[in-house]
Image (cartoon, rainbow, N blue to C red):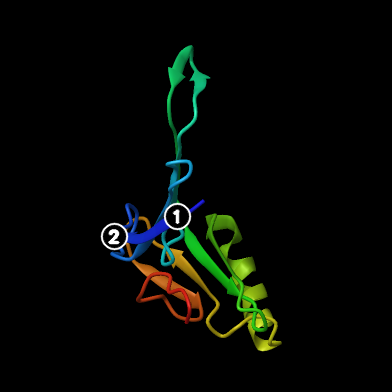
Amino acid sequence: MSSVQSYVKCNQCGFSEASEVLDCGTNGWWVGCTRCGYQESWECKSRFSNGHLERGVNEVHYSAGALWAEDSKTRVATLRGLAENEIEEIAAKMREAIASGELSSRSYVTKFNFVTGEVTALVGQVPTRGLQTGE
């Protein structure tokens, strides 16, 4: 199975390099923003909802921030959106993990302001580029 990755504009913060991945085998796609944590996906599957047959399932997850945790040895990373009530606790844990060397200094936690649309870094730096493979 193959996939195609490109960049699209984030529907939440407007970042021009949110990652979009198209799965050529399933025709499903996923969008993830490394700045604000917004995620959206679409799956090509049928299901009944409210008595109607839906051909595709679209899921949208607005986020109060983003977490990028990169293992300092393997460089395997995790990207996920954060809920407002967990940001401060996760930021504190990330600071400790970076200081101990468990996580790479490229790791970060951001916070998204829904009123102003601004993204600020609580740990590390706000990314200025989208996901870069092979760096």
- 89 and 128: which is toward the camera: 128
Callout 2 crowding tier (Cα within 10 Å): few <14, some 14–19, many ≥20 = some
Q: Position of residue 101 (x, y in %)?
A: 68, 87
For the view shown, which residue lies furthest in the top direction? 51
Q: Is residue 83 above or below residue 96?
A: above
- Which three-letter amino acid code belongs to the residue tagged 2? Gly
First-in-chain label (1 vs 2): 1
Q: Quadrant of residue 116?
A: bottom left
State which mark lies toward you, 1 or 2. Answer: 1
Question: What residue do we see at 47% from left, 57% from top?
Answer: 64
Q: Position of residue 80 (x, y in %)?
A: 54, 60
Q: How many marks?
A: 2
Q: Quadrant of residue 54?
A: top left
- 22 and 107: which is toward the camera: 22
Are dots 1 and 2 in contact, CB under 8 Å? no
Q: Is residue 2 above or below residue 72?
A: above
Question: What residue do we see at 64% from left, 67% from top?
Answer: 89
Question: What residue do we see at 44% from left, 42% from top?
Answer: 28
Q: Position of residue 46 (x, y in %)?
A: 49, 25
Q: Mark 1 falls on what kind of element? A: strand
For the view shown, which residue lies furthest in the front direction? 1
- 119 and 39: which is toward the camera: 39
Q: Position of residue 55 (x, y in %)?
A: 43, 25
Q: Which mark is residue 14?
A: 2
Q: Mark 2 falls on what kind of element? A: loop
Task: Report, in whole angstroms, how far the alpha carbon at label 1 lies from the one at label 2.
Answer: 24 Å
Residue that mark 1 sits on: 3
Question: What residue do we see at 31% from left, 64% from top?
Answer: 15
